[in-house]
Image (cartoon, rainbow, N blue to C red):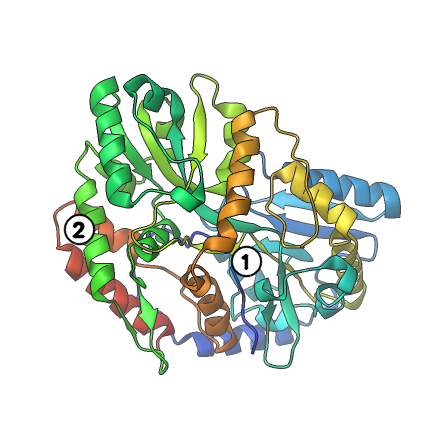
Amino acid sequence: MTTVGVRRSRRLGRGGMRRLAPLAAVATAGVMLLSACGGSDSGGTSKSLTFWISTVPGQDAGWKKMVAQYKKETGVNVKLVNIPYDGYTTKLHNAAQANSLPDVAAVPALDPIWSSKLVDLSSIANKKSNNINANFLAKDSSGKVLSIPSDVTASGLFINKSLFEKAGVSFPASPSKTWTWTDFIAAANKVREKTGAKYSLTFDQSPSRLRAMVYEMGGKYVHADSPGKFSVDAATKKAVNTFVGWNDDKTMPKSVWTSGADPAAMFQSGDVVAYWSGVWQVPAFADSITKFEWASVPTPAQPVQASDVNSGGMTVGFNNNGDAATAATKFLSWLYEPAHYQALCEASGFLPVESGLSPKYPFKSEAAQAAFKLYNEEIPLYAPISGYFNSAQTNWVLKGKSLTEDPTKTELGKAINGQQSADKALQNIVDGYNQQVGG
């Protein structure tokens, strides 16, 4: 079985753990519901499709451009619907139950309740001229291609370059000569103290970003053995305890991981030294940050050069009815033709999943151009652990399971608030994984 290669996935839903019904049963019930409702009246037509996405401002530009171009060339109207990320997976889940799925979507992960409704994208993925990296595809055991990434993403580090220069503190520019997390935190704290900045670092309230840091510190985070039982290793415990300790309202604000404060807004205010997020921020920062100079810098390695690398979005087609399914496949086939796909990457600021392309990003910002150059240099250097979670998600779905709610944010929020130890938080997270996707 071929599995997904690399994700943004990027972010799973907010909230704590709740007891779930066995997911295989949920998936079966969902399929029965869909069958009972029929399918001939759901979805679009040969001339009108609905396309769901969920993306930050700036990264929707390419989608808007391509659906407009497609309508001009073919007369087919593709209605683009940008849905807020929080609640997006639930909306898809509910749409499957109501027999009202879109015709095309860019999703963060597959869901067993609708995976049986997916169109086979093999004809697109296997077309040699598309040069799509096969490591990034989601396939089932029969070879059916369930999804193709819209792009490749990775966690990464941004700094307020103006503050670093004001403090006279240096930073690495090449991934071949990167720093450790210990060195970075020491440098960021020094900048904060010298410049009077409020915090040294803001850090997305995201399991993905935490995994990346843990991988770089030599851990595997919450990792399954061959029978599917999850645990954490000593390096993970050490890394997570270190992370919780950083949340002291000096190095890092507690409010991000305890109450959902916006780390990107904090960084863009100019009063924070650095921000741990990912490549998808670059298009927005290219336009929104004007009061100071910013830069993407190499991800720390302590001792592992890694990240949490994912499919930026998993592009799928749904088999709602014959006409719409055929039209959806034609649209996606057109989209992944190299010239069209390169145009999408250029307009949205995507790192391409197709090899042999040379996107010319339209950013006037030198920092944005340098950021994409850096990510393209870094990704080949990342250790294989970087793609573990993205591959795992697809395998879970193909077994009729999914991590509906990742307990990482809630449990570590409690640890940061002093309600429990970091080790206890990790144990609760392991229990949550074993309950939902273990075995």
Relative to 386, does residue 246 appear above or below in the rendering? above
Tag of residue 247? none
Of the image marks 2 and 1, the number of the one nearer the N terminus: 1
Q: Quadrant of residue 323?
A: bottom right
Q: Are marks 2 and 1 in contact (CB under 8 Å)?
A: no
The kind of secondary structure element at disc 2 is helix
Nearer to us in this view, 424 or 124: 124
Tag of residue 92? 1
Quarter of the C terminus within the rendering: bottom left
Q: Position of residue 30 (x, y in %)?
A: 54, 72
Nearer to us in this view, 112 or 320: 112
Q: Can the viewer see residue 56? A: no
**Is residue 432 rendered to the left or right of residue 321?**
left
Q: CA distance from mark 2 to mark 1?
A: 32 Å
Report the residue marked by disc 2. Answer: 415
Q: Amino acid at mark 2?
A: Ala
Nearer to us in this view, 436 or 344: 344
Q: Position of residue 121 (x, y in %)?
A: 70, 66
Label 1 environment density (alpha carbons within 10 Å; few <14, some 14–19, many ≥20): many
Tell me the residue at 51%/60% (across/down): 109
